Amino acid sequence: MPPAPCRSRTIADVEAEAIARRLWPDAQPEVEVLGGGITNRNFKISIGREAFVLRIGGKDTGLLGIDRRAEHEASLVAAELGVGPEVVGFVEPEGYLVTRFVTGAPVPPDELRRPERLGNFAETLRRVHDGPPITARFDSFRVVESYRATALAHGVAVPEAFDEAQALAAKIERARSAPPLRTCHNDLLNANLIQTGERIVIVDWEYAGMGDAFFDLANFSANHELGDGENLTLLEAYARELRPRDEDALRLMRFMSDFREAMWGVVQQGISELDFDFVSYADEHFERLRATAAEPEFQTALERAGSRS
């Protein structure tokens, strides 16, 4: 077997080592790069038998709506609720979060679609939504507008698909009629769910804020490509009953989940220094929201929700 290619050291690598020595001056920390992130650089810091995660924020992540102090607050709440990793420290003035390393792996999407797993995750998410309020606010309808303005300010051409999607988003917002604000994660990608034994730990709370619980449910559903039957299982476990209005809300907010992801990819084209195809990422989510809007069930859900508002 040929030797593995050497990865060149980056500024973030050097910074991570310096921060590790700053945090543990009397130890000899071992620093290891963790993969998986497309916004930040993540490092595993080993001190003897203990291990921690240091996340160094990517360039200009504030333009994505990320507030590192708000992330720290949300991470503390998640840890208190038993759904997030223990928070060990907050590096200032940089705003880098240090958490205890969670030994485990992302839950395979196929396994998460099993009824018992959907039920377990629904209960975990309800614990978050019923948890203490946090300072930050997350409104998917304002986020896509903000991302458009940011993209234009950084010389990125906003896809023509934005206008059509925005017109439909306005109808969804009227139909949702100011839902109650709950503590939400708002970025329930598979990579942010770590299985450790029978428990699922939710990591990366940088987009957390008070918002619509059905955005969280829809974001999880869309990111894991749940089918109609699996969505019903998720909703019934979450609300402990099946309600038509919940089915409609989930269907509508799946559109908003993809709209947010699409515009996130558009903004990243102008600000990110990471080696990732953000153009394809945005295109994929615009295509997916078009497919969602074309479903007859979507239009029916929009009409029913509108009549209730």
Image (tube, helix red, strand yellow):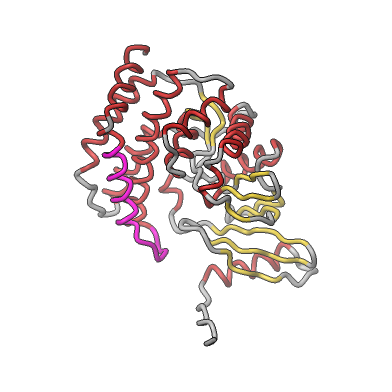
Please tell me which residue is depicted at 58% across the width and 56% down the height of the picture. 94
Residue reaching furthest to the top: 308
In the visual, does 43 lie left or right of 252?
right
Q: Position of residue 298 (x, y in %)?
A: 31, 28
Residue reaching furthest to the bottom: 2
Q: Is residue 14 above or below residue 101?
A: below
Q: Position of residue 219 (x, y in %)?
A: 45, 38
- Residue nearest the viewer, comparing 122 with 162: 122
- Residue nearest the viewer, comparing 189 with 145: 189
| Quadrant position of residue 17 | bottom right
Q: Is residue 41 magenta?
A: no
| Quadrant position of residue 200 | top right
In the visual, does 158 lie left or right of 46?
left
Query: Magenta stretch mostly in which secondary structure?
Result: helix
- Residue nearest the viewer, comparing 301 with 253: 301
Question: Which span is picked out in magenta?
Answer: 272-291
Q: Is residue 274 magenta?
A: yes
- Residue nearest the viewer, comparing 225 with 73: 225
Q: Position of residue 257 (x, y in %)?
A: 40, 38
Q: Position of residue 308 (x, y in %)?
A: 37, 12
Number of marks drawn? 0
Please tell me which residue is depicted at 54% across the width and 86% down the height of the picture. 1
Please tell me which residue is depicted at 30% across the width and 49% down the height of the picture. 151
| Quadrant position of residue 248 | top left
* Image quadrant in which the C terminus is located: top left
